[in-house]
Amino acid sequence: MNARSLVYGFLFLALLASMPIGATAQSAAELKDQIEDINRRRAAIDAEIAEYQKQLNVLSGEKQTLQSAIKTLDVSRSQTASQIRSTENKIESANLKLQELAYEIADKETLIAIDRATVAQSLRTIAQMDDLSTFEYLLSSTDLSDAWESVDAARSVNDALRAHAQALSQTKQVLNVQHEEVGATKKDLSSLSVDLNTQKQALDVNRQSKQSLLSQTQSEEAAYQELIAKKRAEQALFESELDRLEQQLTGSVDSSRIPSAGSGVLAWPFSSTYMSNCSSKSSVLGNAYCITQYFGNTAFSTANPQIYNGAGHNAVDFSAPTGTALQAALSGTITDTGNTDAVPGCYSFGKWVLIKHANGLSTLYAHLSSITVSAGQSVSTGQVIGYSGMTGYATGPHLHFGVYASEAVQVMTLAQFRGATSACANAKMPVAPREAYLNPMSYL
């Protein structure tokens, strides 16, 4: 084989290396079509979720009735079921993307191998020329013009193939990074799917509660309002005794041992996705944070002195459909958990979690439908600690989010102090002197 033939051979191999592998190219195209189909279906599901959210926004602005309470549970359940379907589609899309990347990586590896083989052959040929020396090679050729072209072409092909192989190697590195990223996304989505299924279970529990509520009220609105009135009366008695207890507690809060107001040391107790949807409720709630009642002497607490005993609201309430995942606002240790509903007739915090943080603050999460942590457990910022509900004194699903100075808050029962006679006397819960209650908005 003369030099010109070798050069043509190299050019043929280079052309072969630049062509896609037929089977994998077809598979990649099929995968792209499947991914696009999944994205279209997910867009339709996301539209369903948004429509359910609109219904929940309207319901949250209506007067609390038996019908609206039941409808809120039903709509929340439907919304969560749609969210689960959306997440499952995202996981399916991620799996297909992983396959697509695997095909692309395999293609690139094949092309790199072909290029390397071609470069090696080119180097061997040039080495043979170098053994003769360019001068000797030219003298031995019958056509000097052809010989010069062969030498130049061989070196040009070699340089081009080296550059192409390097480019393909860099492409492979990029694809490997993408493969790892999609793998991490798949892991995150799998975790999210587990969370959503847990929320669905929480909604199923509340469906049973709905049936219980219907049994208690015999589906009569008057009976429902009577039940709410009873809760309010019991809550008023509880707040009165709690206030008396707090006045007996002594000790001042050392401000130097807690973060300064406005420091923003706490994260919102919900996922970023949930918080991003709060703006859709701003026309109803008057804020973009899903807050239904602020800290202090709010309009609601002032209008209901029989409930708050004139002391104002000691936390922030967030609108949260039953089964919404609740997250630790900061890393820390679970001080304790409890359920005041375990004491018959006690309408207070319901299911609650108290977390002690290293910066002198403690956070409270109350009215939960279920709790996923236990006393003494370490948690990280953003970790799911339970799911929202309407246990305890709550006429609608929400999160009662409180912040305390850790040095002054205690977990105890009202019966530990003389004179406690309400139904909550034997229910354990966090209590603190008034100065230990801090405004959550100062730290969010």
Image: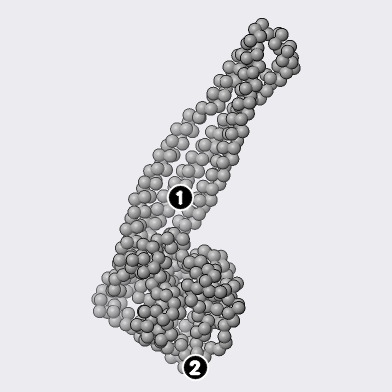
Element type at mark 2 = loop
Q: Nearer the viewer, residue 212 or 65?
A: 65
Q: Nearer the viewer, residue 333 or 227?
A: 333
Give coordinates of residue 358: x percent, y percent: 60, 72
Query: Which amino acid does the dot numbered 1 rest on?
Result: Ile
Q: Nearer the viewer, residue 102 or 361?
A: 361
Residue drawn at x 50%, y 69% is: 444
Residue drawn at x 60%, y 26% is: 160
Residue drawn at x 68%, y 23% is: 123
- 440, above or below 249, in the image: above
Query: Which amino acid does the dot numbered 2 rest on?
Result: Arg
Give coordinates of residue 71: x percent, y percent: 30, 67
Residue sitting farthest toward the top: 142
The residue indicated by pointer 1 is: 91
Give the quarter of the image for residue 376. Answer: bottom right
Give the quarter of the image for residue 304. Answer: bottom left
Image disc number at residue 214: none
Residue drawn at x 55%, y 37% is: 105
- 300, above or below 287, in the image: below
Q: Earlier in the sequence, mark 1 or mark 2?
A: 1
| Residue 27 appears in the picture as rendered | yes
Quadrant of image for the N terminus = top right
Left or right of 290 on screen, residue 16: right
Left or right of 126 on screen, residue 35: left
Left or right of 94 on screen, residue 66: left
The residue indicated by pointer 2 is: 418
